[in-house]
Amino acid sequence: MRPSVLDPLFAPVSVLPGVGPKIARLFATLLADTPGREPTVADLLFHLPHSVIDRRKRPGVARCENGDVVTLDLVVERHLPSPRHGKAPYRVLASDATGTIALVFFHPRRDWLETVLPEGARRIVSGKVEWFSERPQMVHPDYILTAEEAEAMRAVEPVYPMTAGLAPKTLQKAVLGALERLPLLPEWLDPAFKARQGWPDFDQALRFAHRPREANDLVPTGATLRRLAYDEYLANQLALALVRANMRQLGGEARRPDGRLTARILAALPYALTAGQQQAVREIEADLRSPHRMLRLLQGDVGAGKTVVALLAMAAVIETGAQAVLMAPTEILARQHFASMEPLCRAAGIRIAVLTGRDSAKTRRDTQDALQSGTIDLVVGTHALFQGSVAFRNLGIAVVDEQHRFGVHQRLALSAKGRGVDVLVMTATPIPRTLVLTCFGDMDVSRLTEKPAGRKPVTTVSVSLDRMGEMVARIKAAVAEGQKVYWVCPLVEESEKTDLAAVEDRHRHLSQELKVPVALVHGRMSGEEKDAAMTAFKDGAARVLVATTVIEVGVDVPDATIIVIEHAERFGLAQLHQLRGRVGRGDRPSSCVLLYKGPLGETAAARLSVMRETNDGFLIAEEDLRLRGEGEILGTRQSGTPGFRLARLEAHGDLMEIARDDARLVLETDPDLKGPRGAALRCLLYLFSRDEAIRLLRAG
């Protein structure tokens, strides 16, 4: 049960002053993370201003700088109405002791203007000043007030992210109503820690954020926003720690692999494992031998050899008589994992199968029967493996590839397919440390930082789209020498809003210019069509593959040596790095060409510069976080990763580790959250919609 003290915050926004059905719908657009859900009072309070307008600046007319927001104490001189059918604006001249300013209005009601700005009257006017032909003017002032009304005007005014159709004054009125409903909540922070940080109480911090007294009340590094960010991180870390404790409580199996299958795989490999791979295998084997469930994240840069580590982990579990599953986010990737592992499994005597949504009903039924009877040791597939009908005789380990596409719920659902299932998740997206804690705080982490022997670094250059003809000529020469080339485009078809080259147009253009077969892959093709195109490219029937970002993850063509990324300025750093990882997989020198459309903005220029300077995915991930914040870093907002509303990882990342340590300590001393601080922390979990964690508490 949610603590009753929180009830006023979970009321719908329609209880607030000035919020009728129409405004409530606008708030749903602005605030709701779930379509169709009416936002609550808490959602509105968590919608923080992004900046402030300081209306205390009163320089006098003559001393106003162009573009400044100022407040002026003026006497209205005279009205200069626009001609009846003219397009000129309506102007009102007003002055103070230093000079005269024109207040400018487009399409106003004259009677209204004569009422609010009567000639000869004194008015306090606030807004943005612009100098035009060496004369100051203010277009549509924000405020026109009498001296008495001006006393109530807020000196420091918050500015909020908005949505079309919602007036700032309507939003501010609703926020003030929400603040009045804010209850006094129990303090969930450790008192000594809070005092050391110099932080206000939670309710006080929210009031300061919405009713700033000074501009620095909304500085990300200030006490107000750091307090709120920490609360959100603490809720996140406590929820993850509870998931972990629950997984541990469910118990694992202490497995005793004998090493015969892993030895055969190692013997069949054409290369030796890197030191990093050997270390990861040791960590995983130690997890498997312990009586606790394994919950480990295997992070490796593009081409660092995660799949081999995962196969050795699955082989170790199969040695103990259990089954293994590897789940990938796309069919292309699932079938590719199957193709790369099948020869090694054959050499080791492991029975492997593939299961995707595209299989015929009979094939799927046969595979499912074999899984249930135990005649398949290892199955590779897509999310189809989640579906309730798929059952195993004895599932021992689940490996999830590209983990950021699967949330905590799916981790729990998959591991429920067997008794004490060990879970290994892999990602080729190097994730900054703070984000690892955010999304995988319930896991142990292994990192592969070296490339397998023989891999060559990829040379990266950026080239303007103006030099397209030259670029195509160079590709033609490379293809004539027998090289294979990826050409990546950002869109599938022309959009009216953008001038991007559509992937189909580029495919036609390159086919005509290069006079060789060019394969095409994009998201709207059927699985069979994608497979056929990939096979043609892999086998060399087509030496060029034009594709959208569907090739971003895991596609493996070792003899491809060039990748051209068109409109590189539109991609994030992590995505550019993922795409670049499609080449440099063989022993020949490879290159990546970033085709951009100038002029470049500051962030885009910084991104391309980082790509040219380094091949280190972990360094790139940290830069990506710095350049664009955590919002997009894991690809999509709706990918099971927590989207923070109050905290910003690039500004508050240092607080994440403190929150994790705090959460762990709490659960060590009060695992059921029954003590006085525990009760307050339950409030915190509900407040930040982490109620699933509380259900785990009760279930445990």
Image (cartoon, rainbow, N blue to C red):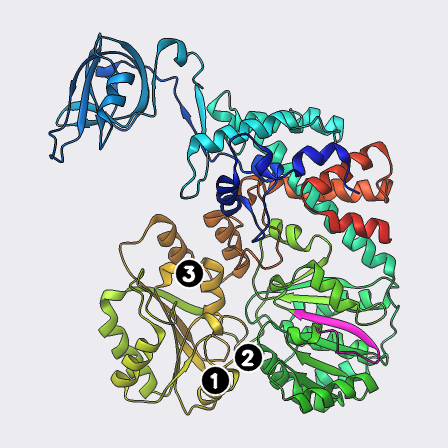
Residue at image coords 82%, 44%: 667
Q: Give the quarter of the image for residue 132.
A: top left
Q: Nearer the viewer, residue 180 or 414?
A: 180
Q: CA distance from mark 2 to mark 1?
A: 9 Å
First in sequence, mark 2 or 1: give its number.
2
Percent of width and height locating residue 114: 24, 18
Q: Are marks 2 and 3 in contact (CB under 8 Å)?
A: no
Q: Is residue 476 above or below residue 644?
A: below
Q: Which mark is residue 332?
A: 2
The disc labelled 3 sits on which kind of residue?
Phe
Q: CA distance from mark 3 to mark 1?
A: 23 Å
Residue at image coords 43%, 76%: 589
The disc labelled 1 sits on which kind of residue?
Met
Percent of width and height locating residue 542: 40, 88
> In this figure, which residue is indicated by the disc labeled 1?
534
| Left-right relation of 622 to 247 | left
Whether residue 376 is visible: no
Q: Nearer the viewer, residue 595 or 134?
A: 134
Range of residues picked out in magenta: 387-400
Q: Which mark is residue 571?
A: 3
Q: Are marks 2 and 1 in contact (CB under 8 Å)?
A: yes
